Image (cartoon, rainbow, N blue to C red):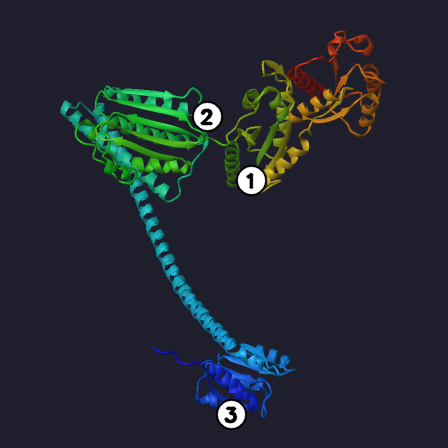
C-alpha cells in the first residue's frame, strides 16, 4: 500500500518566501497548502488535518504566537514549526514554550529551505516517538493498576488462607490436647490392669492389654509429632540454643535406644572423631532428630542387622550420620522422604513396618531451623544412610543470641540484665609468645575459674565473645551488682595461678560492665557501650625502648617486636634515650651495657633517680658473663637480664614475665 505524502500547512504572508518554500517541499514529496494570514490558516485547520504547520512569526493580521496559541486550542497536540526572520529569535523561543516542536530562522539567501524537509521529518519522528512513549506509559499505568488490583486480591486471599491455616492449627492443637487426657487415662488403666492391681488377669487378657498399650503409645507419638509440625509451620517453635557437646548428645541417645537394638539382636556401633567442636543448638531438638533417625534405622532393619552412628568435623560444620543395613528405599521414593505424611513401603519382612509419616519431615525442619541440611541415600535391599549437618558455633553468634535472650527475659520480668567483660590486656602479644593453642588453653582456664567462682543463678551465663578472646558474664543483676561481679573476678584472677606453655603465671585482667535498661535499651547499644569502655580500660599497645649502639641490633629488635604487637622506640645511646623519655613514656627498656659516652650502668642509675622513670622495668642485654650486680646496685634476685647472643624466644619470654610481674605489683 502506497504511503500518503506528508501534508503541510504553510502560513506565510511573503509571497516570494511562500512560493520558494512550497516548491522546496513539494520537490521532496510533501503536499503543501499555503495561507497568507493567520485567520485564513486557522480557518483551514478547522476543516482539514495536517501533519505539520509552518507558521511565520510575523503575519499581517496577528502574531504567529497568537496563531500557535489558538491552534493548540483547536487541535491539541498538533505539530507546529515556527519560522522566524532576523531578530525574531526571542519570539520563536516564546513559541517553543507554547508547544512548538521546533523553530527555523530564515536566511536572506533562503538557504534554510535545504534543511527544512529534514527538520520536518525529524520533528514528525520525535512526535511519533513521543506518542509511542505516552502510549507505552498509559499501558504501563494500566498494567500497574491491574497488577495492584491483582495484588490486593492476592493479599485478601493470602489473609484468608492465613486465617484458615490458623483455624486448622488451632483445631489440630485443640483436638490433640483434648486427645492427650483420655489417652493418658487409657494407658494408665491398662497398666493398672497389667500389674493386676485391679485383680488377676489371664495371659490372653494380658496380651490384649499389651496391644492396647502399644496402640496408645503409637497414637501419643502421632499426636506429639502433629503438635510439633503445627508449631513449626506456624512459626511458634522457639529454639533454646546452648553450647552442647556432640559426643554427649550421641551417647545419651544411644543409651536410651540400645535396648531396642538388643531386642532385635542388632549391632549398634558409634564412631566419633577424637576432638569435636561444640555446637550452638537446642539440645532437646537435636536429640529428637537423632532419636528419630536411629530408631527408624533400627525399625527398618531386620534381626541381626547393623546400625552405625558417626559424628565428624568438616571445615565449617559438624556432620551426624546414621547408616543401616536395612531394607532400603526405592529410588523413586527418595525425593519425598522428608515430606509430611509420607509412609514409604519398606518392602516385605520385619523391616517393613510403617510410621506416622511425620518424623522425617519434623527432623528436616528442625535441622533447617538450626541452619543445617539433612539428606538421605539408599539402595533397596542394602540399607540407607541419613546424614545431617549443623554449623560450628561462632563465638559472636553465641554471645549475641545469649544477650538477646537475656534482654527479652529482663523485659518480661521488668528487671535488669548486665554484662561483665573480663579481658586479658595485650592478648595478641601473649598469643605471639606462646602460640594460639596455649593461649586458647589459658582462656579455657579463665572461663573455668569464673564458672567455678561466680555465684550461679538461673539466667547467669559465662561465655566467650569477640572470637573467643573475651570471657563474659551475663547476669540478671543491676548496674551495681555487675560492677561487684567484675571486681570480684579481677581480685580472684590476680591470685590464681595459670599454666601457659609449661609455666605458671599470674595473669592480670581488665574488666568493664554495661546494664539494661539503665544504660542501654537494645543489644546493639549494650555492645557499643561495652566495646567503648573496653577500649578505654584495656592497656594500650606496650611501648618498648631499645637502647643499643649497634644499628643492626636495634633494627632486628624493632622488626621482631613490632611484628608481635609491641610499639618500639630505639636509641643509639644513653643521652638520646634520656631525651626521648622526657617526651615518650615507655613500659619496658632493653638496655645494652657496653656503649660509648654513657654506658648502661650510668644510664641505669640516672633512670632510677628520676621520679618519672624510676618505676620503669629494665632488662639488661649484655655480652659479658659477669653481670657486675654491685655496680648496678641491685640484688641478684630482682636482676633481669639476657646474655648476648640470645634466642629471640628467650628474650620475649623474659619480657613477658617482667611486664606481667610489674603489672601485678602495680597498684
Report the residue at 16% width, 30% height from top.
Answer: 348
User: Which quadrant is the C terminus positioned in?
Assistant: top right
> Which residue carries the number 1 mark?
523
Q: Position of residue 234 (x, y in %)?
A: 37, 45
Tell me which corner region of the image, top left, top right, bottom left or bottom right, holds residue 656. top right
Residues at marks 1 and 3 touching, judged by CB atoms closer than 8 Å: no
Dot placed on the residue nearer the N-terminal end, 3 or 2 = 3
Establish if 318 lies above or below 142: above
In the image, is residue 233 above or below residue 627? below
Mark yes or no: residue 262 visible. Answer: yes
Q: Measuring 70% from the left and 26% from the top, which residue is drawn there?
A: 542
Q: Please identify the quadrant where the N terminus is shown.
A: bottom left
Q: Which mark is residue 258?
A: none
- The answer to which of marks 2 and 1 sits earlier in the sequence is 2
Crowdedness near tag 1: few (<14), some (14–19) or many (≥20) residues, C-alpha within 10 Å:
some
Could you tell me residue 647's position as x and y percent? Answer: 66, 15
Q: Nearer the viewer, residue 616 or 461?
A: 616
Q: Secondary structure at mark 3?
A: helix
Say which of 265 and 478 sits in front.
265
Residue 388 coordinates in the image, percent (x, y): 36, 32
Q: Which residue is mark 2?
A: 277
Q: Are marks 3 and 2 in contact (CB under 8 Å)?
A: no
Residue on which the image places disc 3: 40
Compute the Cα span from label 2 to label 1. Answer: 27 Å
The secondary element bearing badge 2 is classed as: loop
Q: CA distance from mark 3 to mark 2?
A: 96 Å
Foreground residue among 367 and 90: 90
Q: CA distance from mark 1 to mark 3?
A: 81 Å
**For the point 56% across and 19% down, which residue is it?**
438
Q: Residues within 10 Å of mark 3 (few under 14, many from 20)?
A: few
Amino acid at each position: 500500500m502506497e504511503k500518503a505524502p506528508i501534508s503541510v500547512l504553510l502560513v506565510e504572508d511573503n509571497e516570494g518566501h511562500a512560493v520558494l518554500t512550497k516548491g522546496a517541499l513539494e520537490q521532496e514529496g510533501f503536499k503543501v497548502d499555503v495561507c497568507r494570514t493567520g485567520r485564513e490558516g486557522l480557518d483551514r485547520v478547522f476543516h482539514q488535518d495536517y501533519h505539520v504547520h509552518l507558521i511565520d512569526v510575523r503575519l499581517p493580521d496577528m502574531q504567529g504566537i497568537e496563531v500557535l496559541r489558538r491552534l493548540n486550542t483547536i487541535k491539541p497536540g498538533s505539530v507546529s514549526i515556527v519560522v522566524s526572520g532576523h531578530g525574531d529569535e526571542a519570539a520563536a523561543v516564546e513559541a517553543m514554550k507554547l508547544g512548538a516542536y521546533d523553530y527555523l530562522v530564515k536566511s536572506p539567501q533562503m538557504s534554510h529551505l535545504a534543511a527544512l524537509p529534514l527538520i520536518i521529518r525529524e520533528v514528525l519522528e520525535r512526535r511519533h516517538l513521543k506518542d509511542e512513549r505516552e502510549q507505552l506509559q498509559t499501558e504501563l499505568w494500566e498494567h500497574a493498576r491491574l497488577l495492584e488490583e491483582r495484588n490486593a486480591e492476592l493479599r485478601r486471599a493470602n489473609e484468608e488462607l492465613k486465617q484458615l491455616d490458623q483455624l486448622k492449627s488451632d483445631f489440630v492443637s485443640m483436638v490433640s490436647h483434648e486427645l492427650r487426657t483420655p489417652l493418658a487415662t487409657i494407658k494408665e488403666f491398662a497398666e493398672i490392669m497389667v500389674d493386676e492391681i485391679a485383680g488377676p488377669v489371664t495371659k490372653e487378657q494380658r496380651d490384649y492389654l499389651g496391644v492396647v498399650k502399644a496402640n496408645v503409645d503409637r497414637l501419643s507419638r502421632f499426636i506429639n509429632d502433629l503438635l510439633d509440625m503445627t508449631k513449626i509451620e506456624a512459626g511458634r517453635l522457639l529454639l533454646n540454643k546452648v553450647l552442647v557437646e556432640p559426643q554427649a548428645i550421641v551417647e545419651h541417645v544411644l543409651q536410651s535406644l540400645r535396648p531396642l537394638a538388643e531386642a532385635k539382636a542388632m549391632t549398634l556401633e558409634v564412631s566419633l572423631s577424637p576432638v569435636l567442636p561444640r555446637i550452638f543448638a537446642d539440645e532437646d531438638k537435636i536429640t529428637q532428630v537423632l532419636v528419630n533417625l536411629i530408631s527408624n534405622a533400627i525399625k527398618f532393619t531386620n534381626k541381626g542387622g547393623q546400625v552405625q552412628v558417626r559424628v565428624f568435623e568438616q571445615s565449617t560444620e559438624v556432620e551426624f550420620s546414621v547408616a543401616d543395613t536395612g531394607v532400603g528405599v526405592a529410588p523413586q521414593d527418595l525425593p519425598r522422604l522428608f515430606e509430611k505424611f509420607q509412609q514409604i513401603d519398606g518392602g516385605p519382612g520385619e523391616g517393613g513396618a510403617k510410621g506416622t509419616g511425620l518424623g522425617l519431615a519434623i527432623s528436616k525442619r528442625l535441622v533447617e531451623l538450626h541452619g543445617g541440611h539433612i539428606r538421605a541415600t539408599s539402595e533397596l535391599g542394602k540399607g540407607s544412610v541419613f546424614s545431617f549437618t549443623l554449623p560450628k558455633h561462632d563465638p559472636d553468634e553465641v554471645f549475641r543470641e545469649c544477650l538477646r535472650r537475656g534482654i527479652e527475659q529482663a523485659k518480661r520480668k521488668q528487671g535488669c540484665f548486665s554484662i561483665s567483660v573480663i579481658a586479658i590486656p595485650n592478648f595478641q602479644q601473649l598469643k605471639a609468645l606462646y602460640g594460639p593453642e596455649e593461649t586458647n588453653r589459658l582462656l579455657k582456664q579463665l572461663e573455668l575459674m569464673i564458672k567455678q567462682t561466680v555465684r550461679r543463678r538461673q539466667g547467669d551465663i559465662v561465655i566467650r565473645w569477640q572470637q573467643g578472646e573475651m570471657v563474659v558474664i551475663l547476669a540478671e543483676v543491676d548496674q551495681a551488682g555487675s560492677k561487684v561481679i567484675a571486681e570480684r573476678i579481677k581480685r580472684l584472677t590476680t591470685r590464681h595461678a595459670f599454666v601457659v606453655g609449661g609455666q605458671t603465671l599470674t595473669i592480670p585482667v581488665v574488666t568493664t560492665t554495661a546494664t539494661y535498661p539503665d544504660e542501654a535499651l537494645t543489644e546493639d547499644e549494650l555492645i557499643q557501650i561495652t566495646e567503648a569502655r573496653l577500649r578505654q580500660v584495656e592497656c594500650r599497645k606496650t611501648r618498648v625502648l631499645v637502647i643499643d649502639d649497634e644499628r643492626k641490633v636495634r633494627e632486628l629488635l624493632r622488626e621482631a617486636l613490632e611484628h608481635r604487637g609491641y610499639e618500639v622506640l630505639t636509641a643509639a645511646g644513653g643521652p638520646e634515650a634520656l631525651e626521648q623519655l622526657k617526651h615518650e613514656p615507655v613500659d619496658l627498656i632493653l638496655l645494652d651495657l657496653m656503649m660509648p659516652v654513657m654506658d648502661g650502668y650510668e644510664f641505669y642509675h640516672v633512670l632510677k633517680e628520676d621520679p618519672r622513670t624510676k618505676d620503669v622495668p629494665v632488662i639488661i642485654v649484655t655480652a659479658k658473663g659477669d653481670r657486675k650486680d654491685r655496680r648496678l646496685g641491685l640484688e641478684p634476685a630482682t636482676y633481669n637480664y639476657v646474655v648476648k647472643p640470645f634466642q629471640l624466644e628467650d628474650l620475649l619470654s623474659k619480657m613477658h614475665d617482667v611486664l606481667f610481674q610489674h603489672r601485678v605489683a602495680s597498684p
